Image (spheres, rainbow, N blue to C red):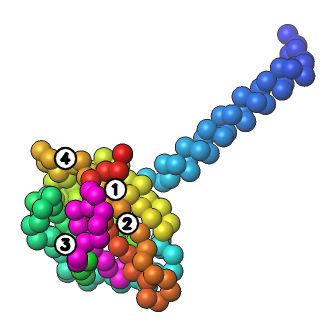
Amino acid sequence: MRAQPIDGRERNARSWVLAEIGCVALALAACLGPIGTPTNTVGDATTAVPSPTAGPTTAPPGPGLPAGFPLMPGMRADEPLPEDEGLIGRWTTPANGAEVFDFLKTALPRAGYRIDLLGPGDTVAVIRFTPPGGQRLQIDLGQAGSGAGASTFMELRLPRD
């Protein structure tokens, strides 16, 4: 049996379908990113690697702060907090964003929190998580400053949706 030649309309329809599938795949890849594989840097931030023996610390209790919330060694609280509805806490560290992201994606589950969303990025990242028996919360990571003086900030907040 010989294959039938494809006419121009069928070839054009197939090309559109393949193009649409490709666009959807690219859009999903761009939106989702490689879950759990953040970029190596946040801008040109200086890397400050915590010592292997230093374990996570926990944030002191505060309004809205879940019990046992893990903080990366070297993080310092930014006080006073800016006026921002839903903001629970804000910290800054000289570590780059990828290091903070990696720390949180390991430390949150160890502290008993369920990770609901990992959104790694280049200069910003988002993690949504739920404390045991608690309300879903969001961590926003971003870069403050640039060059050798750059740092990473971490905001704990109610989700913005």
Disc 3 secondary structure class: loop
How far across and down, in percent of the image, does residue 11 sit? 84, 25
How far across and down, in percent of the image, does residue 101 sit? 36, 65
The residue stretch that appears in magenta:
79-95
Asked where in the image residue 61 lies, by quadrant, the reply is bottom left
Disc 1 secondary structure class: strand
Residue hosting label 2: 141
The amino acid type found where label 1 is placed reads: Ile
Residue hosting label 3: 56
Mark 4 and mark 1: Cα distance apart in space: 14 Å
User: Is 37 displayed left or right of 69 in the figure?
Assistant: right
Residue hosting label 1: 127
User: Is 117 displayed left or right of 28 in the figure?
Assistant: left
Mark 1 and mark 3: Cα distance apart in space: 18 Å
Q: Residue furthest front?
A: 83
Residue hosting label 4: 135
Q: Quadrant of the C terminus?
A: top left
Nearest the viewer among 83 and 36 is 83
Q: Earlier in the sequence, mark 4 or mark 1?
A: 1
Q: Residue at horizontal 26%, vertical 61%?
A: 87
89 in the magenta segment: yes
- Is residue 88 visible to the viewer in this orientation of the structure? yes
Is disc 2 surrounded by few (<14), some (14 to 19) or many (20+) residues within 10 Å?
many
The answer to whether marks 3 and 2 mark residues whose Cβ atoms lie closer than 8 Å is: no
How far across and down, in percent of the image, does residue 113 sit? 19, 53
Q: Earlier in the sequence, mark 1 or mark 3?
A: 3
User: Is 38 displayed left or right of 61 in the figure?
Assistant: right
- Is residue 96 visible to the viewer in this orientation of the structure? no
The amino acid type found where label 3 is placed reads: Pro
